[in-house]
Image (tube, rainbow, N blue to C red):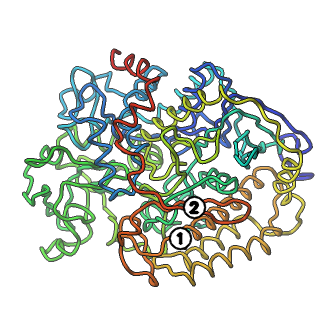
Amino acid sequence: MEGSHWPYPNEMDREEQVYADVLILGGGMAGCYAAVAAARKGKKVALVEKGAVIRSGAAGSGFDHWESACTNPCSEVTAEEIAKAYIDEQDGYSNGIAHYIECQEGWHRLLDIESFGGKIRDTEGEFEGADFRDEKTGLMFAYDYQNKFTIRVWGSTFKPALYKELKRLGVEIYERTEATTLLVKKEQGKRRGIGAMGMNARTGKFLIFTAKTTVLAMSRPARIWLFDADQVGLCEFRPTQSIGSGHAMGYRAGVEFTMMEKSVQGEFSAAGRSFPPYSTGNNHNTWYAATMVDARGVEIPYVDRDGKELKTVRERYYPAKGQKFFLKGGVIDNPKYEYRGPETLDFEELMKRGYQLPFYADLSRMPESERRVIWGMMVGEEGKTKIPVLENFTERGFDPEIHRLQSYGTGWQSASFLPQERQLFGAPGGIFHDWNLKTNIDGIYAAGDQLYASDCCGFAAATGYYAGRKAAKASEGFSFEEPDREDIETEKKRLYAPLYVEEGMDWRELNKAISKAMQNYCGGVKNDMLLHQGLELLESYEKDMVPLLSCKNPHELMRTHEVLDILEVCKLILNACLLRKSSSAPLCFERSDHPEIDPEEDRCFITIRQEEGKILSRRVEKDYYGDVKIQYEQYNRDYEEEAAGYEEG
């Protein structure tokens, strides 16, 4: 780092040893809640986050709704009903354990955040009298106004409130510190997680975290198929630094994954090929249920599940006759419309009826409270929208009372995505686990986006807290184990190597090469030959390009480590794709050499892990977790008293 004018001290020659009962890797929504749960149990907790916890993670900049708060006092549905709907909506390729936890405990986590200082209800009466507001509680609901299980929240207040609570509870927070490798010890043929290693991304100091139990609470993978070094901020919907390092660490350590063959075509953002999320009018998620018009200003009708045209805006928020509830928002797409199209009707049907492009969201035709809650609150609180969308558009004169906002819906916009431009979006693959959210390695737990079929913020918070309390309990049965010195020295050599390469390759070059390789060999249509060629190409990158990576300071070094993790995750995905010998509609998985769609023998989870360089796999029934309500109650009798306190409150 000599001569680089780096403003932080050079501590590459220093080591720091940290001991904790429970180690949390990742300081996003899941990690923070895991730390809160473990600290409440009186455990010594260390939390490692490569950013600043107060705003780190996918929830750091905010979010506008909290899915599946099924036990809130206004809810007309049960946790069991919505969890099973999630499972059915994904044709069983869903995480019944985690979704039931989300539905059963999500409301408790909202009450937690409110007690920490986050805002979950309209306390000022700004929307008093609105159809979506409960006058008694001040709670405001989204999507289904009858069943009231999705709550509009001021998500930008959540991470600062969580950070404050972590400090109050005495959690040891290691910010600007990247976790790089899990420490695993093998005794009598059984493996156990004993901590992790990492590096300070400002000083280069090496850290060894020795822990009785560890919770993986980092992000899902990103920048796999799509990367643009000139427009990095548009590469993915989630923060660009959230790239799946936890998946890479887990895979290297032998953690078991499933559904990693699943990937959907690019949605929100694609390396400059789309517009910033929610900056264009639509009728999905944040903008639900905006009035849509065509180029002439002719309104596009809404129809219910049975094809009945809805005459009022209010009707859009209520189930059809005979329909118990409908799911809308987050990754769930089980709408109450007859046609599954970009808006209310499919595109071909709209063209047949004479509607003309482009389409627009016209909030001026909606009731005043609906207009204000969409443009003012929802767009204002959703991630990446408060400043780049709400503030910038308003400063430049956009007025939702008189202006329309052009819509660029999926599948018919001018910058449509190519089949090979995929993303790990929409309940993607991740870590396989049991009812304790424990991985196949003793002492290692997972939560949030690390889990397979992960969802949004409510999912992250509920599973994070759950994993934290399970890890805290399990820590009582373990003692500290010191890592092997050889493992430490091997990791240090791997981490610092790019600092000693002069005039080498920048991390962006390798990221771009990896993305292009994945587009070419693991795109929309796959076969064995392509997948094997893709693996061979990535292995050649590992052999020939990785030793050429060069950087000048710890920040660039951290970015380089991210790309090494992306490379590891890509190998995981390619190997997972090779294991499924048929095509699958629910998994968005198509093979030219195995075109049969969802044969009976393949309707299962196919897991993948590696041990001593060998790929190991097994098949697991989709309903392996049993009856979600019965199993949850069996595994969480110790939570009953705490849960009763939330209900009384």
Q: Secondary structure at mark 1?
A: helix
The image position of residue 61, as x and y in percent, is: 50, 41
Q: Position of residue 567 (x, y in %)?
A: 67, 65
**Disc 2 marks which residue?**
608
Left or right? Give the position of 356 relative to 508: left
Q: Earlier in the sequence, mark 2 or mark 1?
A: 1
Question: Residue type at mark 1?
Answer: Leu
Using residue 456 as the reference point, say whether residue 296 is left or right of it. left
Q: Mark 2: few, some, or many residues within 10 Å (few <14, many ≥20)?
A: many
Mark 1, Cα crowd under 10 Å, few <14 / some 14-19 / many 20+, is: some
The residue under the point 65% across, 52% down is 250
* Residue 363 percent coordinates (x, y): 23, 49
Q: Are marks 2 and 1 in contact (CB under 8 Å)?
A: yes
Q: Residue at x 41, y 68 (%)?
A: 602
Q: Is residue 89 above or below residue 71?
A: below
Which residue is identified by label 1?
579
Relative to 259, is 23 above or below?
above
Under circle 2, the secondary element is strand
* The quadrant where residue 412 appears: bottom left
Q: Nearer the viewer, residue 293 or 582?
A: 582
Q: Nearer the viewer, residue 27 or 273?
A: 27
Which image quadrant for residue 79?
Answer: top left
